[in-house]
Image: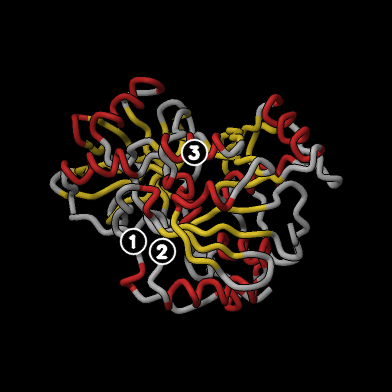
Amino acid sequence: MRVDLFDFDLPDHCIAQGPAEPRESARLLRVPADGAFGDHRIADLPSLLDDRDLLVVNDTKVIPTRLDGRRGQAGFEATLIEQKSGDSWDAFARPGKKLRVGDAVLFAGELEATVVDKLPDGRVTFRFALSDADLRDALWRHGRMPLPPYIKRSKGGDADQDAKDRESYQTVFAEREGAVAAPTASLHFTPPLLDALADKGVQTVRLTLHVGAGTFLPVKVEDTAEHKMHSEWAHLPAEAAQRLNDHRRAGGRIVAVGTTPMRTLESAATPDGTIRPFEGDTDIFITPGYRFRAVDRLMTNFHLPRSTLFMLVSAFAGLDRMQAAYAHAIRTGYRFYSYGDGSLLDRAGDDT
């Protein structure tokens, strides 16, 4: 499909720079398979879901991988995006053009590294003097949260703001370290909201997908068939897969809380809809025409124009339907992207 079919105009003022407070006060756009859209709040979820719904959430935890560095007297900022080994990470560096293979660099907290590779897409590979748990501990001490580029923060970082982001850019489910971006649909949940959902009989199942920076990379080709999807590591335990299959056999609905559970579940599902345990990398690229096997409803935030995530929601609910939903959201003041508002979508053609 032509990528420009997934384009739309989004005013800058629609991009959220911080979360709603409290989290469940964020707005929620209900998008049924047909009929009128519904304007709600996240706090209304207990009235929009029932005991037929089983929520699937991502328990990945974001690592603070943004670092200030120096090469000699020249300063730069690096965002580590993918761990390659115990002591090596690929990163985006700004400005990175002057970095050369073999250069020694010094990051905050006397964290030393060497440039060992430069890749054609602008990435740089650093090998650190520390490795494994020692390196991870240093990142937690000296790194900043790797917020996406559309969330603006002061150059060089602000300690108070980063402390706020360390809390607000982490979900209530965060447990397994490994992500460099948050599974943002889950940012809306709080313990009281989960208690209210449990009182309605809404169950929750956890899986893990370590979100990579590829989530934010633009699609630069003209046709979706030419796009190479980034891969991310995911894990769906056998016990979770069994619960999901049992729930569907009993007539229940599976609600993916975010595109990362959606991609994991669809990667794990067989053609007949059976959900198998899964562990490994997935590069599944979902565009209109895809036949969904595992997911009945999707809760998600509002995504970038021409992005793989807007393509995914268009595949799920219909391109025309999502274009209309986004036009309604822009017109009525919904907040977009990671810290923005949410939506609850029914699968196209589903009248449940």
Horizontal side, residue 135 vs residue 164: left or right: right
Residues marked 2 and 1 touching at CB (< 8 Å): yes
Q: Residue furthest left?
A: 73
Mark 2 residue crowding within 10 angstroms, few (<14) / some (14–19) / many (20+): many
Name the residue at 76% across, 37% down: 275
Mark 2 lies on a secondary structure that is: loop
As measured in the structure, the alpha-carbon distance from the residue carrying label 3 to the one carrying label 2 is 26 Å
Q: Nearer the viewer, mark 1 or mark 3?
A: 3
Image height of 346 relative to 64, above or below: below
What residue would you read off at disc 1? 16
Q: Nearer the viewer, residue 138 or 124?
A: 138
Mark 1 lies on a secondary structure that is: loop
As measured in the structure, the alpha-carbon distance from the residue carrying label 2 to the one carrying label 1 is 6 Å
Coloring scheme used: secondary structure
Horizontal side, residue 104 vs residue 277: left or right: left
Residue 89 visible here = no
Which numbered disc, 1 or 3, marks the residue that appears first in the sequence?
Answer: 1
Horizontal side, residue 44 vs residue 124: left or right: right
Q: Residue 336: which disc?
A: 2
Q: Nearer the viewer, residue 316 or 228?
A: 316
In the image, what residue type sits under mark 3? Ala
As measured in the structure, the alpha-carbon distance from the residue carrying label 1 to the one carrying label 3 is 27 Å
Mark 3 lies on a secondary structure that is: helix
In the rendered image, which quarter contains the N terminus?
bottom right
Q: Residue 196: which disc?
A: 3
